[in-house]
Amino acid sequence: MAVYSHSRLSSYENCPRQFEYRYVQKLETEREGIEAFVGKRVHEVLERLYHHLRRHARPPSLRQVLERFNKDWGILWHDKIAIVRKEHDTDHYQAQGRSCLENYYRSQYPFDQEETVAVEHTVQFPLDPAGRYRMRGIIDRIARTGPGAYEVHDYKTGRYLPPTARFETDRQLALYQIGLERTYPDVERVELVWHYLHFNRTIRSRRSPEQLDTLQTQTMARIEEIETASEYPAKPSRLCEWCDYRDVCPDAKLPKEASSGLPPAEAARPGTAAEPAASAPAEPEPDSDSTPGPESQLRLI
C-alpha cells in the first residue's frame, strides 16, 4: 500500500479525477500556480532564517531576509507559472510574499521565544500496529518550550483565514502531532500552531488522546476507501481554474473569461486541503459547523 500524506488524501477528497491524474496515472505537468510559487519561496526563506539562527546564534536582519526572497524569486521564476486572478500581476504576488515575511519577522524577533528543534522535518509513521496504513508529512518547524513540551508550527501564505472553529478538525497538524509523538520519546504535550502570515495572526490548538484516536480511525477508513476505488469521477468546481490538470480534464469547469475569483484556499469546500508547497492545492478547511471541544484550548492571537 502506498504511503499517504495529508495532501494525497486531500487531492482525492477535493477531486478524485485530480487524484487519478496525479497519483494513479502519474501525469507530469510543468504548470505551477502563482500561489504555490509564493508559498514555496516564503517557506524556503524561513527555513534559511532558522538555519542562520542556529549557526550564528542570532537572526539575519530583515533586510537580508527580504533580499534573499527577492533573489530566489528572480532565479526560480519560470514561464509555466500560472496566474488565474488576472487583475493581479507578478509584482502584486511578490509584494505579498515580502509582506508575509515581514509580518512574521517583526512578530517573532528576536526569535528566542522557544527552542527550534527542527525545520522542514519529515515524519513517517504507521497509523495501525501492523503498519499497513502509513503516513508521511513535512513539518515546517518543531519547537520545544520546556521539558516534554513541543509545538508544531505551520506557515500559511494564503489570503483566506478560516473561522477559528475549523481548526478543531484540522487533520494536517493533528497527524503531524501523531508523527511527532512517535518520533520524540520525551513528548508529553503538543500544541499546534498556525501562522497566517498575510494577516499576521497566530492560531493555537491542542488535541486530546481521544481526538487523535478518532483521527487515526477516520484516516485509515479514508485510505481504505481510496485503495479500493475503481473509478475516479471529476468534481467540477471553481477549483478547476487552479488545477494542474485543467487542460487535460474534459470535465474541468473553466470560465470563458479571466477569473477574478478566489484562489484555492478560499474556494475549497469544507474538509478539503493540501500543502502550500505542492502544486497550488487548497489549504485546510475543516467542517464549518465544528465547534471547539472542552479540551481544545483554542487561542487566536
Image (cartoon, rainbow, N blue to C red):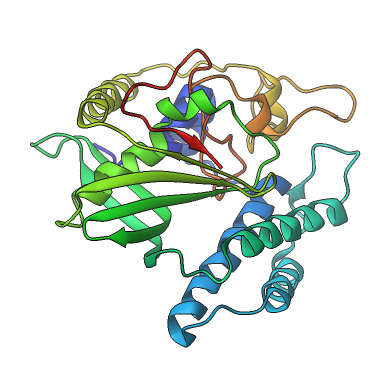
Q: Can you name the residue that lies furthest to the top here?
A: 289
Front residue of 98 and 247: 98
Front residue of 54 and 45: 54
Q: Residue at position x 61%, y 79% from top?
A: 60
Tell me if residue 20 can be seen. Answer: no
User: In this rendering, would 97 be left or right of 146?
Assistant: right
Relative to 14, is 88 above or below?
A: below
User: In this rendering, would 157 be left or right of 259?
Assistant: left
Tell me if residue 289 can be seen. Answer: yes
Front residue of 136 and 51: 51
Front residue of 96 and 28: 96
User: In this rendering, would 98 be left or right of 2?
Assistant: right
Q: Can you name the residue that lies furthest to the bottom here?
A: 56
Relative to 147, is 191 above or below?
A: above
Q: Residue at position x 45%, y 64% from top?
A: 113
Q: Quadrant of residue 174?
A: top left
- In percent of width and height, residue 286 lies at 48, 24
- In percent of width and height, residue 248 lies at 65, 31
